Amino acid sequence: MIVDFMVYIATTSAGKSFRLCIYRDNGATPVGGALVYESGNIAATQGARGATAINVWVDAGNYWLGIETEDAIMAFGRTITAQIYDNAFVAADGCYYDLGAFGAFTNPCPAIAGASGIRPAMVLKVGNWS
């Protein structure tokens, strides 16, 4: 299927950048999973919902969505209620983290730590099921 967009809500750090990614699942963890999509730098707009066009093909299965921020202050909305975009979203809510430098994502996904209290909401728009 083709994933058309990744949607997020940046709530702080206007003027800074962040990056988005998708990792393939590796047995209920992203660790060791292949990087299937990575955005370039995206400028954060405080309090704004954004949609980044990605147009990437993914096979059936589980995936992990990632956000990497330019600073340690940037925050993202945690609710997906009423975040409808073209009526075609699959929601994601869960978090692991890897404290590292801002830049390209590692492929495959590196060792990470769990953080049950930090769960930015991200959604995907699926454009084609065949």
Image: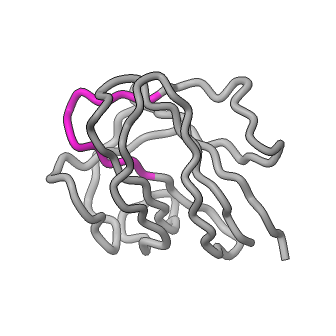
Q: Position of residue 21 (x, y in %)?
A: 44, 59
Q: Position of residue 98 (x, y in %)?
A: 25, 49
Q: Kindly identify the residue that appears in the image at 56 percent across and 32 percent down.
A: 49
The figure's colour scheme reads: one colour
Q: Nearer the viewer, residue 31 or 18?
A: 18
To which quarter of the image does residue 75 belong? top left
Q: Position of residue 78 (x, y in %)?
A: 52, 26
Image position of 3 (left or right of 13): right
Query: Is residue 72 rendered magenta in the image?
Result: yes
Q: Quadrant of the C terminus?
A: bottom right
Q: Kindly identify the residue that appears in the image at 28 percent across and 52 percent down.
A: 112
Q: Position of residue 10 (x, y in %)?
A: 44, 31
Would you place residue 57 above or below residue 111 in this image? Answer: below
Query: Is residue 75 rendered magenta in the image?
Result: yes
- Whether residue 72 is visible here, answered yes or no, is yes
Label total for image: 0
Image position of 10 (left or right of 104): right
Q: Kindly identify the residue that appears in the image at 29 percent across and 28 percent down.
A: 13
Image position of 99 (left or right of 126): left
Image position of 51 (left or right of 4): left
Q: Nearer the viewer, residue 100 or 127?
A: 127
User: What residue range appears in magenta?
Assistant: 66-76
Would you place residue 35 above or below residue 114 in this image? Answer: below
- Whether residue 26 is visible here, answered yes or no, is no
Would you place residue 34 above or below residue 18 in this image? Answer: below
Extreme-left residue of the structure: 101
Most common secondary structure along the magenta stretch: loop
Q: Kindly identify the residue that appears in the image at 64 percent across and 73 percent down.
A: 58
